Image: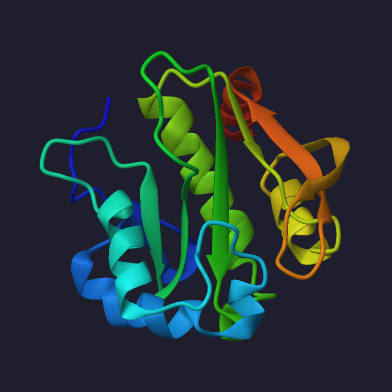
Protein backbone atom coordinates (compact mmCIF):
# COMPACT_ATOMS: atom_id res chain seq x y z
CA UNK A 1 0.00 0.00 0.00
CA UNK A 2 1.34 3.44 -0.89
CA UNK A 3 1.49 6.00 1.91
CA UNK A 4 4.07 8.27 0.29
CA UNK A 5 2.57 11.62 -0.70
CA UNK A 6 5.78 12.37 -2.65
CA UNK A 7 5.35 9.50 -5.13
CA UNK A 8 6.24 10.18 -8.76
CA UNK A 9 5.14 7.90 -11.59
CA UNK A 10 7.33 8.47 -14.64
CA UNK A 11 5.75 8.27 -18.10
CA UNK A 12 7.44 8.02 -21.48
CA UNK A 13 8.58 11.37 -22.86
CA UNK A 14 9.49 12.88 -19.48
CA UNK A 15 5.89 13.34 -18.35
CA UNK A 16 5.12 12.56 -14.71
CA UNK A 17 2.16 11.71 -12.50
CA UNK A 18 2.65 13.03 -8.99
CA UNK A 19 0.47 14.31 -6.15
CA UNK A 20 -1.67 17.40 -6.57
CA UNK A 21 -0.36 20.30 -4.47
CA UNK A 22 -2.07 23.36 -3.01
CA UNK A 23 0.45 25.43 -4.98
CA UNK A 24 -1.28 24.12 -8.15
CA UNK A 25 -4.33 26.28 -7.37
CA UNK A 26 -3.69 28.98 -9.99
CA UNK A 27 -3.00 26.39 -12.71
CA UNK A 28 -6.22 24.52 -11.87
CA UNK A 29 -8.21 27.75 -11.83
CA UNK A 30 -6.83 28.65 -15.27
CA UNK A 31 -7.46 25.21 -16.74
CA UNK A 32 -10.92 24.69 -15.18
CA UNK A 33 -11.97 28.08 -16.60
CA UNK A 34 -11.25 26.81 -20.12
CA UNK A 35 -14.64 25.88 -21.68
CA UNK A 36 -13.07 22.99 -23.60
CA UNK A 37 -11.95 21.40 -20.32
CA UNK A 38 -14.90 22.35 -18.09
CA UNK A 39 -17.48 20.96 -20.54
CA UNK A 40 -16.33 17.42 -19.63
CA UNK A 41 -15.69 17.96 -15.90
CA UNK A 42 -18.56 16.62 -13.82
CA UNK A 43 -17.32 17.37 -10.32
CA UNK A 44 -16.50 21.05 -10.75
CA UNK A 45 -19.17 23.62 -9.84
CA UNK A 46 -19.87 26.35 -12.37
CA UNK A 47 -18.71 29.02 -12.51
CA UNK A 48 -15.21 28.00 -11.53
CA UNK A 49 -13.81 30.38 -8.89
CA UNK A 50 -10.83 30.46 -6.58
CA UNK A 51 -13.13 29.25 -3.79
CA UNK A 52 -14.49 26.26 -5.76
CA UNK A 53 -10.96 25.26 -6.78
CA UNK A 54 -9.84 25.56 -3.15
CA UNK A 55 -12.71 23.26 -2.08
CA UNK A 56 -11.79 20.80 -4.85
CA UNK A 57 -8.12 20.85 -3.81
CA UNK A 58 -9.12 20.06 -0.22
CA UNK A 59 -10.34 16.67 -1.50
CA UNK A 60 -7.33 16.06 -3.77
CA UNK A 61 -4.22 17.06 -1.87
CA UNK A 62 -2.91 14.04 0.03
CA UNK A 63 -2.43 14.44 3.75
CA UNK A 64 0.81 13.26 5.27
CA UNK A 65 0.76 9.48 5.44
CA UNK A 66 -2.36 9.14 3.30
CA UNK A 67 -2.76 7.03 0.19
CA UNK A 68 -2.43 8.91 -3.09
CA UNK A 69 -5.33 8.32 -5.49
CA UNK A 70 -5.35 11.73 -7.26
CA UNK A 71 -2.44 12.76 -9.46
CA UNK A 72 -1.38 15.82 -11.38
CA UNK A 73 -0.15 15.17 -14.91
CA UNK A 74 2.97 17.27 -15.40
CA UNK A 75 4.96 18.14 -18.51
CA UNK A 76 8.74 17.51 -18.48
CA UNK A 77 9.32 21.05 -17.15
CA UNK A 78 6.91 20.48 -14.22
CA UNK A 79 3.92 22.46 -15.56
CA UNK A 80 0.54 21.05 -14.61
CA UNK A 81 -1.20 19.95 -17.83
CA UNK A 82 -3.91 17.65 -16.49
CA UNK A 83 -5.05 15.39 -13.70
CA UNK A 84 -6.23 11.83 -13.13
CA UNK A 85 -7.71 10.21 -10.06
CA UNK A 86 -10.29 8.13 -8.27
CA UNK A 87 -13.72 9.75 -8.21
CA UNK A 88 -14.66 10.41 -4.58
CA UNK A 89 -13.36 8.61 -1.55
CA UNK A 90 -11.95 5.12 -1.98
CA UNK A 91 -13.88 3.13 0.62
CA UNK A 92 -11.98 0.65 2.75
CA UNK A 93 -12.35 -2.80 1.20
CA UNK A 94 -13.75 -1.44 -2.07
CA UNK A 95 -13.40 -3.87 -4.96
CA UNK A 96 -14.33 -1.38 -7.69
CA UNK A 97 -13.41 2.25 -8.30
CA UNK A 98 -14.30 4.86 -10.90
CA UNK A 99 -11.77 7.40 -12.09
CA UNK A 100 -11.73 10.55 -14.15
CA UNK A 101 -9.11 12.57 -15.98
CA UNK A 102 -8.51 15.60 -18.19
CA UNK A 103 -5.69 17.08 -20.24
CA UNK A 104 -5.12 20.59 -21.58
CA UNK A 105 -5.96 20.92 -25.30
CA UNK A 106 -2.37 21.85 -26.25
CA UNK A 107 -1.12 18.40 -25.16
CA UNK A 108 -3.87 16.25 -26.67
CA UNK A 109 -3.24 13.89 -29.56
CA UNK A 110 0.33 13.11 -28.45
CA UNK A 111 -0.36 9.82 -26.65
CA UNK A 112 0.10 11.38 -23.20
CA UNK A 113 -3.35 10.47 -21.85
CA UNK A 114 -3.24 6.76 -22.76
CA UNK A 115 0.18 6.55 -21.04
CA UNK A 116 -1.18 8.42 -18.00
CA UNK A 117 -4.26 6.18 -17.78
CA UNK A 118 -2.15 3.02 -18.11
CA UNK A 119 0.38 4.16 -15.49
CA UNK A 120 -2.36 5.29 -13.13
CA UNK A 121 -4.26 1.99 -13.49
CA UNK A 122 -1.08 -0.04 -12.87
CA UNK A 123 -0.39 2.00 -9.74
CA UNK A 124 -3.93 1.51 -8.39
CA UNK A 125 -3.84 -2.25 -9.03
CA UNK A 126 -0.39 -2.57 -7.41
CA UNK A 127 -1.12 -0.53 -4.28
CA UNK A 128 -4.82 -1.03 -3.59
CA UNK A 129 -7.03 -4.10 -3.41
CA UNK A 130 -9.17 -2.91 -6.33
CA UNK A 131 -10.39 -5.67 -8.65
CA UNK A 132 -12.10 -3.46 -11.26
CA UNK A 133 -11.24 0.07 -12.36
CA UNK A 134 -13.67 1.94 -14.61
CA UNK A 135 -14.23 5.27 -16.35
CA UNK A 136 -17.47 6.68 -17.79
CA UNK A 137 -16.70 9.21 -20.53
CA UNK A 138 -19.48 11.03 -22.37
CA UNK A 139 -20.64 9.12 -25.44
CA UNK A 140 -19.70 12.21 -27.48
CA UNK A 141 -16.11 12.26 -26.15
CA UNK A 142 -14.59 9.91 -28.73
CA UNK A 143 -10.98 10.94 -28.00
CA UNK A 144 -11.42 9.96 -24.35
CA UNK A 145 -12.82 6.59 -25.39
CA UNK A 146 -9.82 6.02 -27.70
CA UNK A 147 -7.40 6.92 -24.87
CA UNK A 148 -9.05 4.31 -22.62
CA UNK A 149 -8.88 1.65 -25.34
CA UNK A 150 -5.19 2.40 -25.99
CA UNK A 151 -4.59 2.04 -22.23
CA UNK A 152 -6.06 -1.48 -22.23
CA UNK A 153 -9.60 -0.70 -21.06
CA UNK A 154 -12.55 -2.51 -22.61
CA UNK A 155 -15.85 -0.98 -23.59
CA UNK A 156 -18.59 -2.67 -21.57
CA UNK A 157 -21.85 -0.86 -22.26
CA UNK A 158 -23.73 2.41 -22.70
CA UNK A 159 -25.65 4.17 -19.94
CA UNK A 160 -28.44 6.31 -21.36
CA UNK A 161 -28.75 9.84 -19.95
CA UNK A 162 -26.27 8.97 -17.21
CA UNK A 163 -24.41 12.30 -16.96
CA UNK A 164 -26.52 15.30 -16.03
CA UNK A 165 -25.32 18.50 -17.65
CA UNK A 166 -26.64 22.04 -17.12
CA UNK A 167 -27.83 22.25 -20.72
CA UNK A 168 -28.55 18.59 -21.56
CA UNK A 169 -28.24 15.09 -20.18
CA UNK A 170 -25.62 12.91 -21.80
CA UNK A 171 -25.09 9.22 -22.31
CA UNK A 172 -22.00 7.58 -20.84
CA UNK A 173 -19.91 4.69 -22.10
CA UNK A 174 -18.56 2.32 -19.44
CA UNK A 175 -14.92 1.28 -19.89
CA UNK A 176 -13.24 -1.05 -17.41
CA UNK A 177 -10.04 -2.93 -16.76
CA UNK A 178 -9.80 -5.82 -14.33
CA UNK A 179 -6.90 -6.61 -12.00
CA UNK A 180 -6.23 -9.96 -13.72
CA UNK A 181 -6.06 -8.19 -17.10
CA UNK A 182 -3.39 -5.90 -15.64
CA UNK A 183 -1.42 -8.97 -14.49
CA UNK A 184 -1.82 -10.62 -17.90
CA UNK A 185 -0.55 -7.47 -19.68
CA UNK A 186 2.41 -7.25 -17.28
CA UNK A 187 3.30 -10.93 -17.95
CA UNK A 188 3.08 -10.39 -21.72
CA UNK A 189 5.37 -7.35 -21.46
CA UNK A 190 7.98 -9.27 -19.43
CA UNK A 191 7.81 -12.25 -21.83
CA UNK A 192 8.31 -10.07 -24.95
Residue that appears at 42% across and 37% down: 123
From this viewpoint, which residue is outermost toward the top? Answer: 93
Q: Nearer the viewer, residue 7 or 86?
A: 86
Q: Is residue 69 above or below residue 31?
A: above
Residue that appears at 56% across and 18% down: 131
Q: Nearer the viewer, residue 145 or 168?
A: 168
In the rendered structure, the answer to whether residue 78 lies left or right of residue 165 reads left
In the rendered structure, the answer to whether residue 67 lies left or right of residue 12 reads left
- Residue 72 position, x and y percent, is 38, 62
Residue that appears at 60% across and 34% down: 189
- Residue 107 position, x and y percent, is 58, 79
Q: Quadrant of the N terminus?
A: top left
In the rendered structure, the answer to whether residue 95 lies left or right of residue 137 reads left
Q: Quadrant of the C terminus?
A: top right
- Residue 61 position, x and y percent, is 25, 54
Residue 78 seen: no
Q: Nearer the viewer, residue 79 or 156?
A: 156
**Image coloring type:** rainbow
- Residue 59 position, x and y percent, is 31, 50
Amino acid sequence: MNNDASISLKLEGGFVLNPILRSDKSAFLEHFSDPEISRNLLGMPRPCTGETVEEWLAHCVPESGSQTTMFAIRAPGGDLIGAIGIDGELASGAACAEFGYWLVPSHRGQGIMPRAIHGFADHIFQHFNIQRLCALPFSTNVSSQRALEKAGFRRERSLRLHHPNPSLSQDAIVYARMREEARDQESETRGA
